[in-house]
Image (cartoon, grey):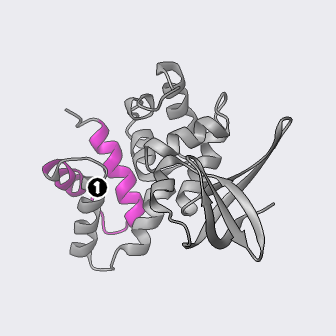
Amino acid sequence: MIASLRGTVVELGASSAVLDVGGVGYEVAITARHRRDLHLGDDVRLRTALVVRDDGVVLYGFEDHEHRVLFDALTQVSGVGPKLAMAVLGEITPAQAASAVASEQDAVFRKVPGIGPKMAKLMIVSLAGKLDALVGQALDERTPSTSSSATGELVSALEGLGWRRDQAQGAVAAVAGEEKSASEMLRDALRYLSGDVG
């Protein structure tokens, strides 16, 4: 399996890039969102997933580990193939997906072309508990050890996920505990906020 590639971008398509890695060109399927961040001549490292099917072999590329984890989780949902998983990645970030799953907000997934109400609900149910680490892991790595800084980081993270500042502060205050890690506090705050939407 090809887990990652590091090389120079030598071609760009609407939803693909060709990386020159040691003289070999690898065509990698990417999202339109990711495509906008790439330029010819860029030296990049992509996480990849190699998908073998009856009609061919496709190498999918992702800008980071979190996008790859979300892709893998999505393709485990019944009825979701690699193309639909890439469509999701093109519309929402891993943090937004994790927040939507934690707060059971299937409307986030319904905004993706090709996903209706039934599929969105199935995604929420199937992904429950599988994406908590996506947001929490990144937050744990960034969060300083002081509690006031940690609280500020959590509030900022929740604001980044689309919550108002007053909602985020209220949720963090409600779930704060000295023995909780940042990822546990974030998960609890998202659950708290799921009842505070409106």
Depth order, front residue of 65/195: 65
Q: Is residue 181 magenta?
A: yes
Q: Position of residue 14 (x, y in %)?
A: 55, 46
Q: Residue at x 45, y 55 (%)?
A: 36
**Residue situated furthest bottom in the rendering:** 145
Above or below residue 188? Residue 1 is below
Q: Position of residue 67 (x, y in %)?
A: 54, 55
Residue 128 seen in the figure: no
Above or below residue 16? Residue 142 is below
Count the marks.
Answer: 1
Above or below residue 197? Residue 40 is below
Give the side of residue 54 with respect to residue 48, left or right. Answer: right
Residue 166 seen in the figure: yes
Depth order, front residue of 152/78: 78
Q: The C terminus appears in which quarter of the rendering?
A: top left
Badge 1 marks a residue whose secondary structure is helix
Depth order, front residue of 9/143: 9
Q: Which residues are magenta?
A: 166-194
The residue at which mark 1 appears reads as: 160
Give the side of residue 57 with respect to residue 164, left or right. Answer: right
Q: The N terminus appears in which quarter of the rendering?
A: bottom right
Q: Residue at x 27, y 67 (%)?
A: 153
Q: Residues within 10 Å of mark 1 (few under 14, many from 20)?
A: some
